[in-house]
Amino acid sequence: MTRTYARNLPRGIQVVQWKNADGMKSIRFRVRIVRKDYKADRYFDSQDEAIEFLATAKSRTGRAELAKKEEQQSRAKLALRAFQMSPTLTFYLDAYSAKYGQAPEGATAVQKRNAKSLEYQLKSIKATEVPNRAAYPVETGTMRTLLTFPKKQFGQFKIEEIDAKTASDFIDERLKSVSPASVQRQVNILQSFFNKLRFIDPEADAKLSENPFQKADKSRLKGANKKRDVRLEDFGEQAEEKLLAELSKCQNPQMGQIVALTLATGMRRSEVLFLEWERVRLSQNHLVLDVTKTTPRRVYLTDEAKAVLEAIKPSGTPSGRLFAYTLEGFSTNWQRVVVRAKLQGFRFHDLRREFISRLVEMLASPSALAVSETMGLTDVRHVQKQYLEPEQTRRIFRGGVKTETDLMKVVGHTTAQTTKRYTSIRKR
C-alpha cells in the first residue's frame, strides 16, 4: 500500500523509504532537528503528525510539552516491559506449593494424600479459563457492560491483574463445571495463597491493595458447606443389604472388612486403612489411633467390631497394617461398589455418620460432649447440630409428634413463641 503525500513539505521533514517487519515497503516522514538548544530525530507514519511535531518543537513551551510527553511514554514503556517480564500466577502458585504444600520427610499417608490433593487443586485452578478484563481498559459506562472479555487461563494472569472482580469471575467460571463445595475449597486455597504471598515475594504482594478472594463476590457459594443429614435408610429399605451384597462380590475380601469395621467403630477412612496390628488391643476391648484428623484417641471395640477384627487375616504388609489398600486404590473400588449397588451419592464418610447416628439412637439421653469425646470430634456444637438434632427430628417422624418441642422441630420453628402464636390463632 502506497501512501500519498504533499510534494511541498515544510523544511525539516524528509520522506524516507521504510521496510516493514513483514517485508513490505512503505514511506515514513522523518523530522530531524539539530539546534544548540534542542535536538530530535523522529519518524512518523503520517505527514500531519510530522508537521505537528515540527511546529510544536519551534517554541520553548512546545519543546517542554514534547519532553514531558516523551518522559511519560518512556515510563509507560518501562512499566509495560516490567509487566511483560514479571512472572505469572503459575510461578507463584508453584512457589506456594513448594513452600507450604509438600509432604515432609517421613510423612504419613494422610499427609502425602493432602499434598497430592493440593497439587491436583492447583492444577485445576491454573487451567480455569477466566475473562481477562485487562484486555479492554474501559473502566465505566455502557461500553464496559457490552464488552465480551476474551478468556485466558487463570495461571497466565499477572498478580497485578487479579482484583476482586477477576476473583469473582473465577468463582463464576468454576461453578459452571463443579459443585459449590468444590469451588469453596479452591477459594479457600487461593485466599490462603494471597495471605501468604508476602512470605513468598514481598514485591509481588505490594502490587495488591487487598486479598482479591476475600473481597470477591461469594454469594453463590452460600450453603456450600451445609450439613449433610444422610443415613443408609435414605437410599431405600434394602440399602445396607445391597451394599454388603456388592462388597461380597469383590475379589479382595478386604473391601468388605474395611466397610464392616467402619460401621462397627465409626472410624474415618484414613484411620481404618492405615490401622496397624500393634494398635489393636482385643483383650482390652479397644484400639489406639495415632494417625487421626484431630488428636490421638482410643476406640472402644464392640462385640461386632471384635468379630470383624478376628476375621481379618494379616496382610503381610511391611508396615504391619491390617489392610494393603492405598487411599486412591480403595476410593476407586468404593465408587465401583456404590454404582453397582445403585447407591449413587452415598459417600464412604456417611458410614461414620451412620455409626454415630446409631450410637445416638441407642442412648436415652445422648450428650454432645460424650459423643464428641468418643468419636474424637473437637467441636461439641458441631456434634449437636450435625448428629443429635437430626436424630431427634428422625425420632419424631418415626414416633409421632407428642410435645410442643416435637412440633417446633417438625414445622421448623426456632422459638416456642412462634409456635404459641399459631396455637392461639387456632383457639379463636
Image (cartoon, helix red, strand yellow):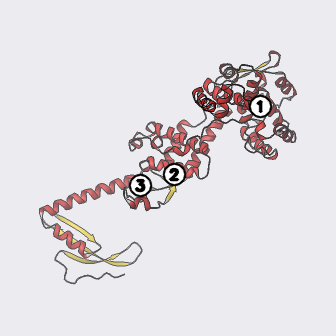
Residue type indicated by callout 1: Arg
Ranked by sequence position, the earlier of labels 3 and 1 is 3
Position of the C terminus by quadrant: top right
Above-or-below relation of 137 to 341: below
Position of the N terminus by quadrant: bottom left
331 on left or right of 97? right
- Residue 31, quarter of picture: bottom left
The residue where tag 1 is placed is: 398
427 on left or right of 258? left
The residue where tag 2 is placed is: 154
Ranked by sequence position, the earlier of labels 3 and 2 is 3
Residue 412 image position (x, y, % from top left): 63, 33
The residue where tag 3 is placed is: 84
- Residue 115, quarter of picture: top right
Q: Residues within 10 Å of mark 1 (few under 14, many from 20)?
A: few
Q: CA distance from mark 2 to mark 1?
A: 51 Å
**SS class, disc 1:** helix
Residue type indicated by callout 2: Phe
**SS class, disc 3:** helix
Q: CA distance from mark 3 to mark 1?
A: 66 Å
Residue farthest to the top, as pictured: 284
Residue farthest to the bottom, as pictured: 7
Residue displayed at 84% across by 27% down:
308
